[in-house]
Amino acid sequence: MKYSKIIGTGGYLPEKVLTNYDLEKIVDTSHQWIVERTGIHQRHIAASNESSLTMAEEAARVAMAAANISSADIGMIIIATTTPEKIFPSTACLLQQRLGIAGCPAFDLNSTACAGFVYALSIADQFIRQGAVNNALVIGSEVMSRVVDWSDRAVSILFGDGAGAVLLGASDEPGILSTHLHADGTHKDVLFLQNALGKPTGLETELYMQMNGKQLFKLSVNILGQLFDETLAANHLQKSDVDWLVPHQANIRIIEGMAKKLDLPMERVAITLDEQGNTSAASIPLALDKAIRDQRIKRGDMLMLEGFGGGLAWGSALIKY
Ligand code: COA
């Protein structure tokens, strides 16, 4: 049986940092409120010459170096992004051109928002398991700073920019054990970002992200708890078999609840939220990359990845690293 194994990871964060104290000068908020309610201290903001494409390329090159493979070895590129470089061509095609590897399939997952990375990972995993692809580059890259209304204190404080990349390679040894994807469009109004094509007039404010934070909080706690049960049951495993939780970085209170649900101490949770905020589809690969690079996550560890976001869409991946 063939598995996809993580053979390299990479991350990129823009140089500019926006602290909660900086935000105090823009909207009526405080460092203390933001830390207490979210766990976020700062976030990175892309420069005007940076984009989901440039950040994806940086992260991809780091992941390729970590895996010690060249671009010619890549058989598929998927970029999860809510903030693509263009509507088309896909950011993945633009990256493919930069990597000089014409021919392999390359596409974006645009509207799975913060669940985008687990969706992309799941798709790449299916191709590798089937034997259609040997190495797949799976990236989450986001410039959230360009889709938030900086005068909306309920939303702007949460998000940041960045990119994370994972290189998957075919292996006979267990890697990704299973992935589980879900969506429920009845919650379409809880979190959304309109575009000018869907509603051509009178939508100026809706061109920024709209969110019902309280409702989203409650929904996420419910769906993620069920998701863990489903993921463990599918693999005939117990909570005690999980070594690391690598969650989407939305709110420290949600993450703490999820760690509790898995009986994991917070030392066993990959956290970047305090330094990076919510980078949407980039948050899981960025957290994974950091914990692998500083050698907290080690080969053989069992990882539970989970993501959720607009749609509502959510999903998990259980991985033997
Ligand atoms: N600074 C100071 N006060 C703020 C504020 C800010 N940045 N944002 C909101 N407030 C105020 C509200 O106006 C409200 O005031 P009121 O009581 O006078 O009406 C009060 O703080 C409480 O607001 P509320 O929205 O109830 O706070 P909350 O405890 O639900 O926290 C979130 C808000 C957004 C942090 C929280 O709901 C959350 O994280 N939800 C999930 C969001 C998420 O996961 N998004 C991404 C999904 S991919």
Image (cartoon, grey):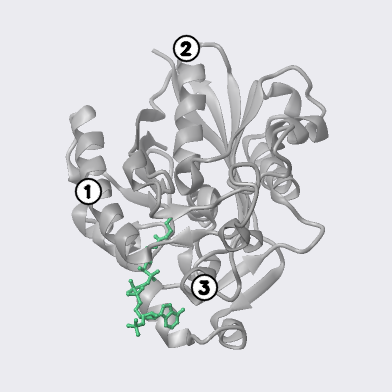
Query: Gap in Å between the C-alphas at discs 1 and 3?
Result: 26 Å
Ligand 1's quadrant is bottom left
As drawn, the label of residue 130 is 2
Residue 260 image position (x, y, % from top left): 21, 59
Query: Gap in Å between the C-alphas at discs 3 and 2?
Result: 42 Å
Which label's residue is closer to the chain start, 1 or 3? Answer: 3
Q: Quadrant of the C terminus?
A: top left
Q: Nearer the viewer, mark 1 or mark 2?
A: 1
Give the residue furthest to the front: 201
Identify residue for label 3: 157
Three-letter amino acid code at the position of disc 3 = Ile
Specify whether 153 is left or right of 257: right
Query: SS class of the residue under badge 2?
Result: helix
Specify whether 165 is left or right of 129: right
Taking the spot 63% from the left edge, 67% from the top edge, the residue there is 44
Which label's residue is closer to the chain start, 1 or 2? Answer: 2
Identify residue for label 1: 225
Query: Gap in Å between the C-alphas at discs 1 and 2?
Result: 30 Å
Q: Nearer the viewer, mark 3 or mark 2?
A: 3
Residue 53 image position (x, y, % from top left): 73, 45
- Disc 3 CB within 8 Å of nearest ligand 1 atom: yes
Whether residue 164 can be seen here: no
Q: Are marks 1 and 3 in contact (CB under 8 Å)?
A: no
Three-letter amino acid code at the position of disc 1 = Gly
Q: In the rendered view, tell whether residue 275 sits above or below residue 61.
A: below
Q: Nearer the viewer, residue 41 or 159?
A: 159
Specify whether 11 is left or right of 309: right
Q: Residues within 10 Å of mark 1 (few under 14, many from 20)?
A: some
